[in-house]
Amino acid sequence: MKKIIYLILFLFSITGFSQNPLDKIKKYLTNKDKIETLRLTNNDVNDLVIVNEFSSEFTKINNYHVKQRVNGIEIINSDSNFLMKNEEVYAGGEDFYRNISSKVNIVTPTLQITEAFTLVLSKLNAPQVRDVTLIESNGFKYKLTNGVLNQDPIKAQLVYFYTKMNTLRLGWNFEFYTQDTKSLWNVVVDAVDGKILQKHDLVISCSFENHTNHSHNKDNSNSFNKYFFNEKLNPTTTALVPAIGNYRVYPSNIESPNHGSRQLISTSGNALASPYGWHDINGNDAVEYTITRGNNVYAQEDANGNNGVGASPDGTASLTFDYAYGGTGVAASTYTNAATTNLFYMNNIMHDVYYQYGFNEANKNFQQNNYGRGGAGNDSVIAEAQDGSGTNNANFATPNDGSQPRMQMFLWTNGPAPTLTINSPASIAGAYSITDNGFSPGHIAVPVSPGLTRNLVLYNDGTPDNSDACTAATNAAALNGNIAVIRRGTCTFALKAKAAQNAGAVAVIIVNNVAGGAPGMSGADATITIPVVSISQANGEAIITAMANGTVTVNGNLTAPAGTFVNSDGDFDNGIVAHEYGHGISSRLSGNCLGGSDEQMGEGWSDWFWLMLQIKATDNGTESKGIGTFATQQPTTGVGIRTYPYSTDRTKNPFTFDSSNSQVAPHGIGSVWCTILWDLTWAYIEKYGYSADVYNGNGGNNKVMRLVLDAIKIDGCNPTYISGRDALIAADQATTGGQNYCMIWKVFAARGMGTGASSGSSVDTTDQMEDFTEPAPGPNCTLGINYFENEDMISIYPNPSNGLVTIKINKFSGKLNLQVIDINGRVVYTTNDTDFNTEKTLNLNHLQKGMYVIKINGDDVNYIKKIILN
């Protein structure tokens, strides 16, 4: 009976909560000022639907993603972000389309649902699905069978799509896994002519130098009821003691085998985030699984790459997962259990840690059972170890809340970094750091000692840039039998290698064309038969300079480390696991709608999610932090799969906002965003200190983790760097009253995201404009009196005055105390804790003529000014 009462109360609260915000949003939109500002008609706002809801206990802001509808049919991409605090809407509606009722083409589809889906498969060149049938319909939403993928039905919805021609086309929106499970497509196809109007692959792949744009669908599910009748509504009140598991893993603050040692860790998980432990899914006394499966993640091997049910290690009743790991010199199949255990552990850590900062059930996290805490369950992560469908990569697919995401971790074929030793001339003699390629197929290892000793010859193709090897060599005779030196350029690494090979070169050294370390290189060409390595711009150009236009002979040796290398396993690179899980966090917290912006920050957030876990008390911001150095077999001091290491030292990482114009989307652009977030992290640590308690600490690292997740929630769909910056400032204002306003601005302005910076179009990655201007200090900044002596910052006018006196403080909002004091020192006018927003007018007509002093203080403002009343 008690459970039924809880259920009724919860359902009642959900019902009231889901209706009331929409009423308030409509009221907000029909306000006269908003009608004039947004120029929306009643037809534009009378049929709205909330498709995503987010909340934060820290900011107290409720965020609603709202779509327009016509005749009950949603307009895809019409999402507008409405923010509500203290039961009042204060922002939203700017992204709605205008005059929608006059722009629709038809109301009934010409192409039926199965016919449209067949057309989609043919246009995507995807495997056909036999006997597609309708299995569920709910209004304009449907589910269809998906061939052999019984657990992953095709989701479909009838929608309107806003075109560049200013029309609304009726279309079918499909979300489905392809039969080979390599893609999770979200596609909109015209319901009249079958033309594809929009397509995104929701599988986010993170191979280095393989930069493609990734997109995310929006979550339209809000299914709570099916979980209430067989699960406990209040797990935190139970006396159940979760079972403790024992896992031999690399601890969550150790990046990889190259960074530290494995340990046998005993834990049942975090009590708040995983109240019944890591192997339970129903809250009863006994665990449901003794394998690497539980409420947050199901980790299994997928060596055959078919996304089927693979093997998982069994910890038996003692839940002990203690397996040997033989290192990179043995076959991966000999340590699969160890790899799967590490993958299970790290997924649970990511779940439990970021739960503390707002990635919980109500905000669409990944759990099989949500224990009555809101959101849609049935979406624990499927994590596949040693996935055989690829190499040198990792990916994460994030469907909507209530559908399971999939993480795929691959083996990496990059052996330990080889070395280039210049023998002559003496001016540049010595050892140089180089990076091997990740071609698959086409990777040829650098030979071990004694290696390959030849002259180095600069490639010349006769076409500027003359040495980028994008066309055939004009100096093939000189290259024949020697090592080709090639500048990085616009064509692919594999194409450069093949051009040098065709000219007779026995190896290739590719020189980076931007500052930083040696670039990672991906590609595929099974006909490549020579080793290909890369070198940093500084070292490579020094070698080219020494050649003196071919008049000086440069001789060098390429040697790979001795010893056997088979592969490195991404399952042991905690940074890559965290990065992939981070895609799920940012996708879900943004409402699965990052994909509409080419400037979106998903890759940067994912790098940052990992960096926050590995900070130690002895660290400092000026150190270099790479990503994926173990997977790529670089030294721990290497950059891994990024252009620069993450560091607050701008000689190590010179990125500014303008750098995003030349970085490839999304990985290169994302690394610029992470660079700024890393600066911000260390600004917070410098101000508030560091806490090793990543769950309950109150250090600067904890504060900035909370800030970033809160900002993602309120940033809305299709964010840009500028909207991301502003969301961080808004989240701090809502949480602390703006105590970190100046600090946040200072960090962003230093990297070119000052007040005058512009993102331009969200779908153009080359139109960003940087600016280094900091704004006038805002509330709770440390503001000296001399600062406000500048009349540009604070002014009191007119002076002399006839009694009405205006006080203006540029860009200031907060609480102030005001006093007017006469020449005898008596306070003749006072007001305390006055809300001040830029300017305020005082009526002093009741005072006699003469000289007075106005005294202003509060929120670190301390200012005195003489005035004369006529």
Image (tube, rainbow, N blue to C red):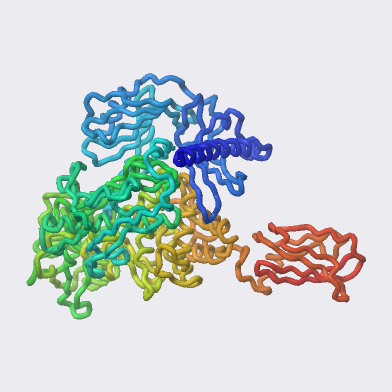
Q: Position of residue 579 (x, y in %)?
A: 33, 56
**Which residue is painted at 31% across and 44% down in the image?**
405
**Which residue is painted at 27% across and 34% down in the image?**
124
Q: Is residue 110 above or below residue 481?
A: above
Q: Quadrant of residue 153?
A: top left
Does the image show residue 778?
yes
The answer to whether 741 appears left or right of 799 in the picture is left
Front-most of residues 698 and 34 = 698
Across the whole image, how many numbered discs are drawn on residues? 0
**Which residue is painted at 47% across and 59% down in the image?**
706
Q: Is residue 166 above or below residue 675?
A: above
Front-most of residues 261 and 438 = 261
Q: Is residue 62 above or below residue 531?
A: above
Q: Quadrant of residue 258?
A: bottom left
Q: Is residue 162 above or below residue 264?
A: above
The answer to whether 602 appears left or right of 816 in the picture is left
**Which residue is painted at 55% across and 55% down in the image?**
730
Q: Position of residue 518 (x, y in %)?
A: 26, 65
- Image quarter where the N terminus lies is top left
Residue at the far front: name it.
Answer: 1
Residue at the far right: name it.
Answer: 848
Q: Position of residue 825 (x, y in %)?
A: 85, 75
Q: Quadrant of residue 567?
A: bottom left
- Image quarter where the C terminus lies is bottom right
Front-most of residues 713 and 75 = 713
Residue at the far bottom: name it.
Answer: 426
Q: Position of residue 186 (x, y in %)?
A: 35, 36
Front-most of residues 520 and 833 = 833
Does the image show residue 221?
no
